[in-house]
Amino acid sequence: MSQVSDFWSRRKAAVQAEAEADAQAVEEQIIAQQRTELEEKTDAEILAEFDLPDPDTLEAGDDVSGFMAKAVPDRLRRRALRRLWRLNPVLANVDGLVDYGEDYTDAACVIENMQTAYQIGKGMLAHVEALATEAEDGDEVDFEDDHPEPEAELATLAPQENPEPVLVPDPEEAVEADLPPAPRRMTFEFEG
């Protein structure tokens, strides 16, 4: 059942949301003030204040939940997590199945003095046309060692002078016998 909301229920919800927003703003102010105070202290003083061990001396199985408190500065939290990741073999050893672990930038694939037939704005058009004219003249295409074989297939894609016409069937002449039968609907009868 949907409940019809009248003016007073909307007003009550708005006042409650405003009170929650005020409480959250006050809490964020207190946390920000605590962080500014902690930024002035050294790491040893902060660890002593929160009764936390030195993150660099953590061992396997130690509890790091104390470092996850909102009042603990991020620099100490990061140090504790780094130590945890180094200690845990599941987190420390990457198995090589990471999708983005390799360098897939162009700089990784660039070879010195590499040349290409690609032209900005024209693509491979000039190269394909040259291959097509060589094929029409009857000359065999000589590929140098630096050209891959797929370029030979591009010569067959060159435009033909007199292509054969393609016949397109008229949709109005479609034969009904070729169509699959329409699905049947089930009917149910209840005796009562």
Image (tube, rainbow, N blue to C red):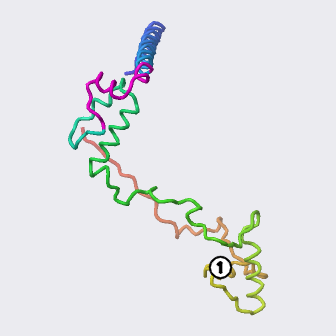
Quarter holding the N terminus is top left
* Spot occupied by residue 150 in the image (x, y as percentages of width and height): 61, 79
Tell me where the magenta segment starts and ends, as one range: 36-55
> Which of the two residues, 119 or 6, is positioned nearer the viewer here?
119
Place residue 127 in its image quadrant: bottom right
Up/down of 47 relative to 175, above or below: above
Amino acid at the residue labelled 1: Glu
Residue that mark 1 sits on? 151
Up/down of 13 relative to 35, above or below: above
> Which of the two residues, 185 or 157, is positioned nearer the viewer here?
157
Q: Is-magenta flag for residue 39?
A: yes
> Which of the two residues, 162 or 23, is positioned nearer the viewer here?
23
Residue at the far top: name it.
8
Q: How many marks?
A: 1
* Spot occupied by residue 15 in the image (x, y as percentages of width and height): 45, 9
Up/down of 16 relative to 104, above or below: above
State the residue at coordinates (31%, 49%): 91
Residue 37 in the figure: left or right of residue 175: left
Residue at the far left: name it.
61
